[in-house]
Amino acid sequence: MAGSDPQTPPSRGPLARAVLAPVLWLEDRTGIGAFLKPIMTHRVPPSARWFYVFGSATLMFFSLQIATGVCLGTLYAPSASNAYENLVYIDTVVPFGWMLRAIHGWSSNAMVAMMILHMVQVFLHATYKFPRELTWIVGVFLCLLTLALAFTGQVLRWDQDAYWGIGIGAAIADRIPIAGNWVRDLLLGGPIISGETLNRFFALHVFVLPGITMALVGLHLVLVLRHGISEMPKVGEPVDPATYRESYEARVHKEGVPFWPDAAKRDLVFCGSMLLLLVAVAMWLGPIGPNGLPDPTDIDTNPRPDLPFLWIFGLVSLIPPASETVVMLVAPGVLILGLVLLPILSNGGERAPSRRPFMVLGVVLAATSVGILTWEGRESPWSPVMDAWSSLPTPVDYVKDRGPLQLQGAVIIQNAQCRNCHELGGQGGKRGPALDDVATRLSYDQLVRQIQQGGGNMPAFGKSLTSAETEALAQFLLTMHPANEQPSNPPGALLPIPPQAAESGG
Amino acid sequence: MKRSPLVMVLSMSTCVALSACGRGALPPGAVEAAAVPPPGLDTPEGVANFWSSNCAGCHGADGQLGAARPLDDPLWWRTMPDAQVVETVAVGLGRLMPGFSARAKGGPYIAYANLGDAEIELVVKGLRARWGTPGEPAAAGAAVRLGDAARGASVFANACASCHANGTAASVTDPMFLANITDQGLWSAVVFGRPDLGKAATTLSPGEVADVVAHLAAMRPAWASAAALDPAAPSKPATGDSTP
């Protein structure tokens, strides 16, 4: 900023004057320096230390997204028939094209992570209270925009993950009462996923969402400057809207330090370290996707959403079917409304986390839930193991001492691909219950009914298995009980009487 | 000398950025994938991988103690010519052994059927090298011949019934068992037994085996016709009926 100071001391030599002259001319005609100086040197509380760097890092990653996004825009063609090859071309032919995609992809995740850290910090320190309510509300919308950018960007990869991700998104939109079909058509550009869909998501990801985001980031920064950076919360110093502003101004005027360079240097160091980490991650993990051509007829696939949405994937896979509409449509609405109304409902009082235990508990609960659901989404144990039937041998103990018909049943367990969803000896799918002790839960009649008619998320096999195959399968499954545990004996069922009991019983 | 954190960060990121140059112009995954091609089906490793992902499910991890017939049986390999094994792998046998080639029309349950006969031949050759007896002349074949059912009934009563009669734990006259197994399957079961489960190969003469198989086949319930046992069968009666 020193160079743009119009009051040049007369003691400078001729060289310095020659260099400074154009700068001074520019400053005189535009006044940029005079405009920026109060912004850069505005006084911030001295307690504003390392906790306050996350917002700057989010902005840094957003700027990086714009820069790399513009570069990718020169290489990418939003055409449904070519998008996939286009990505392969960027990865393999364009010099360091893969690095560009890797940075854009991982920086997207980093931006979401920094935004969440920023939001959690603001929430825990109750910075959203008076007079910064609107800053928080704009931030909530920036959060939604960031997630929307991440989702639309994932769709542009136009691979299997994108195809199924957008399919699930459209199915959720379809559930909206009355307007569902209309919203879905608006998103997809018609009732089905097509080239139109890719064009719409391209327009959203490249023009609409970044434009709105930039405008709201500007508003967010104006509000931050207008109300000043908040101090670290102190126990026993509650926010009182009647007196807060005066006392804040007085304290900052007395104890505050200029933003540049005192506070800005922490932002620079943190952003630089994060950038370094990002380059390392992008370099070693490479670009995200593309994972296989989008082929709706290929069910032998295991699509996953990107990291920020894995927890939603886990959530919708695990909730009971009856609660789906509530969880998918009502809960997000309530959550967003709650976040927007939070500073309106609670704009004064204590800010210190130690005085707001329920808020801290809420953060811990949310972090734990999202963490576990992300893990579940990554592992997705509910997905069938598509090659279990042909690659996982029947446990040897389940083959020994079985009769010919039971051994046929053991073959049918493999052939009918039961193990893609059911474990046997700890190996196989986890979608359905393990079959190792199924005979202790189901009687012969119940086994046959379950095999033929399915139910409880299990498909019916009555049409694909003959009656003799069903019989063999049931006879094998009836041997599936621990040696010391009796098979299932439902009330009223007729059990064969053991020979010795029949002889001695009389 | 006092270093500012900014200088340190900048120099560190320069180092990282420079180290990226050594990684070349391809993404990390692409470089590694190109370096190690998977072993082909003409190598023992390739055949072992094929076995683990396609055959082990029913025939056991090491070719024995699976739900279906053991294939580590030298007697079996001595009897079965390559062509017959290839055909069985390609189109399957009955409804219990699925076909793995495109010719199998997907079979009853198979989600994918994409092998060519040349690949199957490589696999069979590899398996024979693993479990067959080396240097042996090619087997003559094991076509099922049905003998006389009435003679077979007396052979069965003398040689088999003590363990395998109806009502025993190892019954092979159970109509449900017979409905699931082809004549070829019955023949193999009698001839080779289940050595891995302690059930030895037969001591009957080839003629007696043919008679027993005929006896068992005759006991197969009427509703379990050949059509029910053969996944490709539904198309056959249709063409037969349409012939004038």
Image (cartoon, coloured by chain):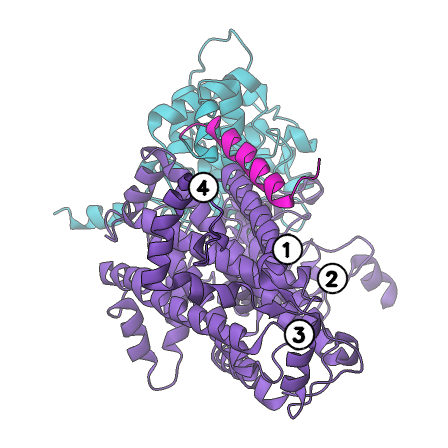
Q: Residue at x 61, y 90 (%)?
A: A345
Q: Quadrant of residue A96?
A: top left
Q: Amino acid under label 1?
A: Leu
Q: Residues within 10 Å of mark 1 (few under 14, many from 20)?
A: many
Q: Residue at x 57, y 74 (%)?
A: A320
For residue A94, say whether it is visible.
yes
Residue B176 coordinates in the image, percent (x, y): 53, 52
Residue designated by label 3? A252
Residue designated by label 2? A487
Q: Amino acid under label 2?
A: Pro
Q: Amino acid under label 4?
A: Gly
Establish whether labels 2 and 3 are both on one chain.
yes
Q: Residues within 10 Å of mark 2 (few under 14, many from 20)?
A: many
Dot 3 falls on a residue whose secondary structure is helix
Dot 3: chain letter: A
Closer to us: mark 4 or mark 2?
A: 4
Residue designated by label 1? A477
Q: Which chain is cyan?
A: B
Which part of the image, by quadrant, shows the C terminus of chain A? bottom right
CA distance for labels 2 and 3:
77 Å
Q: Quadrant of residue A505?
A: bottom right
Dot 1 falls on a residue whose secondary structure is helix
Q: Nearer the viewer, residue A429 or A110?
A: A110
Identify the magenta region. Answer: B1-25
Establish whether labels 2 and 1 are both on one chain.
yes
The answer to the question of whether label 2 and label 3 lie on touching residues, with beta carbons closer than 8 A, is no
The answer to the question of whether label 4 and label 3 lie on touching residues, with beta carbons closer than 8 A, is no
Residue B54 coordinates in the image, percent (x, y): 49, 36
